[in-house]
Amino acid sequence: MTAPTISSKYIQQPVKGRKTSSGCRIQFAVVLLITLVLELMLLYGTAADVLSIGWAAVLHILLVALLLFWQQKLFHCPGGVKRRTVYLFLVATAAFGPIGVMGTLLTIALYAWYRRTTTSFEDWYTGLFPKEQRDEVAELADFLEVHSALGGVSAPDSFRDILANGTLQQKRDAIVLMSKHFRPEFAPALRSALLDPDNSIRVMAASSIARIENEFLEKAMLVDRAVANAPDDIDTLLRQARLYDDYAFTGLLERDREEVNLEKAKQIYREIIRLQPENYPATLGLGRLLIRTGEVEEAAERLRQTLQFRNGEPQLMLWYAECLYKLGHYQELRKLLREHGNSFIDGPGKQRPRIADAIQMWLGRSASSS
């Protein structure tokens, strides 16, 4: 598999290693050519009955010994040539004679051609996950401004469009940014990259998903330790619940782990509500998870209780309205929409037009008359 060469202002460029001096290359080339000539002479001498097979073998062993002495005592060049190519040269010559020398020459030529179009794995991985620090919002906005003209479209939608229709370099940039600043909304775009026709994009997406999973495990260990030290701290518990909540429906983790995250998030939300019954973020988070797992009656009861002290909160009433719809309480749903429909349309409806259209339909309005 060929590692991709990455070139972008969003990706740290690989640092080139030290080049082997020209003197070392010339020395190695001269020894290699002399060895090839001598091995061919031995082969010709044996074929022409000038040398017996026994004498040819002795001379071949002597030549290999001289090469080993040269490699150990005389060839002091740094870098990969001594460590890899010279050892290959010695083993191939000892085993196959002139064919081994020619094989070494072919390997050097192929390596030189390969090196022109690829980078090392270390440089590629450094380019994929650079350590530079930039403002997250500025970087995301700058990327979308440069690589797309999708005015008014959210970042996740733009990333999906870029991965579907962008150039190879744009796709690489998008995967790097989503990995560096991962949010659950990016998960569908990353999953789509796993099916990209280009092999390098699939590899980058898989590497990014593995990195995100490792980061989640690290964050989970830290927040679990913090909760163990302060089990009654509401802020710490809420941070723990949101972490497991965020990773419960991404589709990037294994199904068993996502189910565990879901149950743990619900358990922590319930603990927060037990300690602080009027905690709005915990109630909203728990109600949303209960709706998504089919426990609609419990979700409706909890959200209804929260409405007593947070009446008029658009997000809360929106999830409560979904409960009423799923339970078939249409009369109560119409009453709620008549009382608070405008707050829905002016709030969540501005970011998600489908919500505004659905509310207008239930209220018997047309989009033009709103």
Image (cartoon, rainbow, N blue to C red):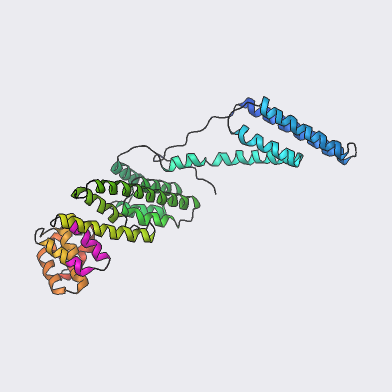
Residue occupying the point 73% across, 32% down: 33
The quadrant in which the C terminus is found is bottom left
Q: Is residue 284 left or right of residue 163?
A: left
The verdict on residue 287 being magenta is yes
Say if residue 264 shows up in the picture. yes
Q: Considering only vertical position in the picture, is 102 above or below 269?
A: above
Q: Nearer the viewer, residue 261 or 303?
A: 261
Q: Is residue 210 left or right of residue 318?
A: right
Q: Is residue 32 left or right of residue 266?
A: right
| Quadrant of res 26 | top right
Where residue 317 appears, x then y in whole percent?
15, 62
Residue occupying the point 13% across, 59% down: 343
Q: Is residue 167 left or right of residue 224?
A: right
Where residue 347 appears, x then y in whole percent?
17, 57
Q: Nearer the viewer, residue 146 or 303?
A: 303
Say if residue 147 shows up in the picture. no
Where residue 66 appears, x then y in whole percent?
74, 29
Q: How many marks?
A: 0
The verdict on residue 147 being magenta is no
Q: Considering only vertical position in the picture, is 25 above or below 320?
A: above
**Residue span colored magenta:** 282-300
Please identify the dominant SS of the magenta region. helix
Q: Nearer the viewer, residue 363 or 228?
A: 228
Q: Considering only vertical position in the picture, is 239 above or below 59?
A: below
Where residue 366 appears, x then y in whole percent?
17, 68
